[in-house]
Amino acid sequence: MLATTAAEAQRRREEPRPQRPSRADILLYNSFPAGTRLAVVSINGRPPVATDRPAFTFTPGFRMAGFGGCNPVSADYRRTGPSDIRFGPLNFVERKCGGEVDRQERAIFWAIQGANRWRPNGRGGMTFTGVRGTVSFAPAF
């Protein structure tokens, strides 16, 4: 039988055991508004300009589908932690609507594509942040 000392175990640099999620982490993870239709309320701090309000649904099956103001869009997403989120490639056909609507839609899609964090926002809404911008959602009626 081989006995290992604490010093030998430390030299081997054993992997630390994973930490159990805290209650706050579990509550945050479970507060993600999957299955709710959410309308965009701001893109990089500016309200949407499209006549048809951009809105999205994030399913419990990790699929996002919605409308950016001009074009329908869909994508897969994954959540690796309480506030982590990542999106796969956005699938849409780019129909031109012109001017400010096209710029707004690109900003929304760009922010969603680059999102890496989410947080609850208000009653049932959320905000995505990432390297490409910020987009905030509220429940759509």
Image (cartoon, grey):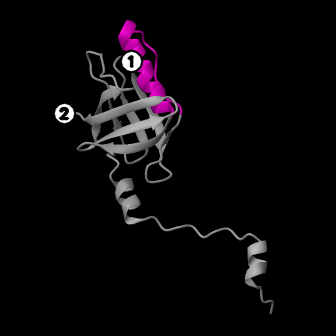
Using the rendered view, name the quadrant where residue 39 is placed. Answer: top left
**Callout 1 environment at 10 Å: few (<14), some (14 to 19), or many (20+)?**
many
Residue 96 sits above or below residue 74 on the image = above
Q: Nearer the viewer, mark 1 or mark 2?
A: 1
Any part of residue 63 in sight: yes
**Residue type pointed to by label 2:** Phe
Residue in the image at 36% along x and 54% along y: 28
Query: In the depicted view, which residue is nearer to us: 75 or 140?
Result: 140
Residue 84 sits above or below residue 101 on the image = below
The span picked out in magenta is 89-114
Residue 29 sits above or below residue 78 on the image = below
Question: Which percent across, then down, holds residue 100?
Answer: 37, 10
Residue in the image at 32% along x and 27% along y: 42
Query: In the depicted view, which residue is nearer to us: 47 or 34?
Result: 47
Any part of residue 98 in sight: no
Label 1, label 2: how far apart the Cα atoms are: 21 Å
Q: Disc 1 marks which residue?
A: 104
Q: Work out whether mark 1 precedes mark 2 in sequence or the reverse, and give the earlier one.
A: 1
Marks 1 and 2: CB-CB under 8 Å? Answer: no
Left or right: 74 in relation to 53: right
Q: Give the SS element for disc 1.
A: helix
| Image quadrant where one finds the N terminus | bottom right
Q: Is residue 87 magenta?
A: no
Residue, far right: 2
**Residue type pointed to by label 1:** Gln
Q: Disc 2 marks which residue?
A: 141
Query: In the depicted view, which residue is nearer to us: 66 or 101?
Result: 101
Residue in the image at 45% along x and 64% along y: 21
**Residue 4 tag number:** none
